[in-house]
Image: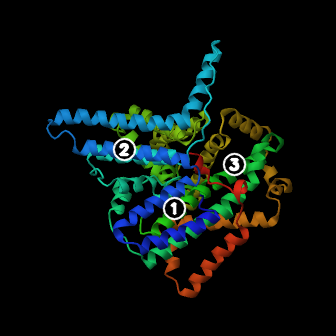
Amino acid sequence: MAFNSLDFLIFFPIVVLIYFLIPQKIRYIWLLISSYYFYMCWNARYALLILFSTTATYLCGLLLQYSGSSWDAVQKRRIDKLYLSLCVIVNLGILFFFKYFDFAFSSLQFFFGKIGIQLNNPEFDMLLPVGISFYTFQSLGYIIDVYRGHIKAEKNFGKYALFVSFFPQLVAGPIERSTNLLRQINKPTHFNVENARQGLFTMAYGLFLKMVVADNIAHIIDPIFLDYEKYHGMIIVMCMILFAFQIYCDFHGYTQIAIGSAKILGFHLQENFRAPYLAGNIKEFWRNWHISLTSFFTDYLYIPLGGNRKGTFRKYVNTLIVFLASGLWHGASWAFVLWGGINGLYLVLYDIFQNTGKKIIGKLKIDTSAPGWKILSRFVTFLLVDYAWIYFRAGGLKQAFRIQQAICRDFHPAYILSESCWSIFGSYTVLLTILASLIMILITDYFQYKGLDWKKAILRQQIVYRWFIYLALVFTILVFGAFGTGNGQTQFIYFQF
């Protein structure tokens, strides 16, 4: 059940209505049932998978919390490490089997084929469970937090199961921490008109990002990427620029709907994006893009590897490991791994040359606070990020290399000014819709970048102005949004991860 579907439009109001009508002590049960129904709408069999992962981490949490009362501190630490290791191995093993087995086996086939050994490909008829990477990481984050003593293990299985399967953020995040979401599940919630207003407005903005911007861009660039060798290199460049905004609006749109729907129910989910394309350098970009995943890898991989505590060289190695792992998390393909590696390399090079760059800027007497410098630094950062998106969008190394060859073959920037380049939009209506939408997004992101909550500012306006904005937003979605049903409905990009 996708957020941009008619099914969800019916499902969500029913969930909210019943949730606030039933007694407080059983509300979590209703949300748990609703969440499993929401997930089973994709494939009912995979509910058993999330249930197994939930049960395994729940039992491990109890073992970590309550076992070993007769042991000394050293024995308990050793046994706790064993429990944690087994739980991590089981959960990552499930993730590996469903998401990475084919990738790993095909890589082995390629390697052994080079030395004359033929491996027979085992046949497994299975689909990648929606959201498996998200709920697996969320469960592992919980069990590590219990192991570290940051939280106590949750005794109530139903409440813990709701933490893992909470439907607003189940299939595409944000990856929530037990210190945030699980604690909220244990607190009573009440219907709040202000929460409902903020939540509905946030959901509407998320639908705008997804249906008006991301989906309309997808309809333009997807056919071109399917047959990119037939198109001029500058058209592909334009498509890559559009893809950067497509993936941002698609994923940010999902997050906004998730945050908004949770807000109506009385829950606060963390922000996943903070105006990433306004970042002045690559480090700032990664502080503001997919924040929940970046912080997860920082806390549960980068810091345990030693972080920046073991010297400069180890810091750079740890950074590359984290970004290679992030690339692999996104998809079972060497293209995703390379995408992560490129971004990790960006950060390493940025750190290496940061002091040198400051010295050069100082000698040249460049005013880094000047608007021209800020625009240039943001433009360069965007180009670096957008280049890496080629590997993300292609999905395979061969396709990524061929896309780059196609760009280099016809790299004539002046072609962008030609009418044939802009004809990919099909009509002036689509072109103006996308341009106007992107300008609006950049404006709202600029307010967020400056620390201004533009949504609350709108909600504080007089009723006439508020309703004018509400109706304009709904009108834009209904008139300019890309609708579809069944196979024609555009899914969220991050569902595949």
Of mark 3 and mark 2, the one earlier in the sequence is 2
Instruction: Please say if the residues under marks 1 and 3 sit with CB atoms less than 8 Å apart.
Output: no
Q: How far from the left and from the top, in percent, is residue 330? A: 55, 42
**Residue contact between numbered discs 3 and 2, judged by CB atoms under 8 Å:** no
Considering the numbered disc 1 on the image, is that residue within a helix, a strand or a loop? helix
Q: Do the CB atoms of the residues marked 2 and 1 lie less than 8 Å apart?
A: no
Q: What residue type is labelled 3?
A: Met
Question: What amino acid is found at the position of numbered circle 1 in the picture?
Answer: Ala
Q: In this view, does 120 lie to the left or right of 60?
A: right
Q: Which residue lies furthest to the top in this view?
A: 116
Q: Quadrant of residue 186?
A: bottom left
Labelled disc at residue 57: 2
At label 2, which amino acid type do we have? Answer: Thr
Is residue 30 in view from this perspective? yes
Residue beneath disc 3: 240
Q: How much space separates mark 1 and mark 3, taking CA atoms?
A: 27 Å
Q: Which of 339 and 480 is in front in this view?
A: 480
Residue 413 location (% of width, % of height): 77, 48
Give the answer, above or below, for where 363 lies relative to 406: below
Image quadrant holding the C terminus, namely top right
Q: Nearer the viewer, residue 5 or 43?
A: 43
Which one is closest to the eye, mark 1 or mark 3?
1
Mark-to-mark CA distance, 2 and 1: 24 Å
**Residue 465 figure quarter:** bottom right
Classify mark 2: helix, strand or loop. helix
Q: What element carries label 3?
A: helix
Residue 32 x %, y %: 44, 59
